[in-house]
Image (cartoon, helix red, strand yellow):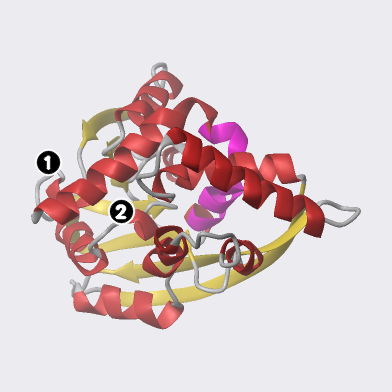
Amino acid sequence: MSSHIHTSHESVASGFTETASDYDDAVRFNIEGAQRLVLTIPPGRYERVLDVGCGTGWATQATIDRFHPTHITAIDPADGMLAQFREKFAGAAGVEIVVHQADVEHMPVEEGSFDLVVCSMAYHWFPRKWEAAKAMARALKPGGVIAILMSGRGGEQAYRDVIANIEPINYRWLGAFDGNLRSCSEMEDYLTGAGLEPVDIWMETRTRHTSVDAYMERMRVVAGHMIGDQSDAEVADYVAKIEARLRELAGPRGWRYDFAKLFAIARKPT
């Protein structure tokens, strides 16, 4: 792995470690997303499950609730997230849970050893998305299923329009959206490029209203590490400008924004 890619993985992991204790409260909609993802998985018996980018464990919990697997391996590069995960599942009964701190390209798992791979709201953070799909495909048994949920193209446009006019322009912050968000056709290419057979790929876009405080907290928790390498004072000034503009634009129901979620289900050929 190049030093640039390694640094990218470390930056994301460090950012989520710092905000892990606030994560569940800041992005409650992602719990529903993980549940919906697992509900779309074809019926079957999935004894061994791999949760990639497990975070605090929403997808793991949804998988346990629906499929009652006997084993789950959970992978995440952020030790803060894994601490939350371990606490949440410390008393889990009827399922063996193994936790590893690792990125998707260096998972300490055997090839062809899982019936199901779940990746909920993590794929957009992978710096090498083609390689991520291949790594997850290698972990699947023939006939196994992969289920992915990620941020889709077209979401957060109102916020992007705001930061595009906050000067001096933060090109890294703007570019982070284009680097992370993907379309259905792009996801199809990742899956087929990894030797998988897409079952269904679709996008859901929702319009939401929230308070400016809640929206700013969400951005801090999930993506504050992407703002750049400025000093604390520079970051605080930049964020204050964004918040002020959001308050100017917010209506009676608060800040309005669109959020796009991309779902994908695929199977490994037998």
Question: Measuring 44% from the left and 78% from the top, which residue is drawn there?
Answer: 184
Q: Position of residue 247 (x, y in %)?
A: 78, 50
- Would you call the spot at circle 1 few (<14 residues within 10 Å), some (14-19), or many (20 or more)? some
Front position in the image: 236 or 33 = 236
Residue 60 vs residue 179, the one in the foreground: 179
- Checking the image for residue 235, the label placed there is none
Type of amino acid under label 1:
Pro
Residue at image coords 54%, 29%: 22
**Extent of the magenta region:** 23-37
Q: Amino acid at mark 2?
A: Val
Q: Is 146 left, or right, of 169 in this rendering?
A: left
Left/right of residue 20 with respect to residue 216 in the rendered view: left
**Secondary structure of residue under mark 2:** strand
Q: Separation of disc 2 and disc 1 at Cα?
A: 14 Å
Sequence-first disc among 2 and 1: 1
Residue 108 numbered mark, or none: 1
Residue 38 in the image, given as x and y percentages of width and height: 48, 53
* Magenta highlight on residue 25: yes
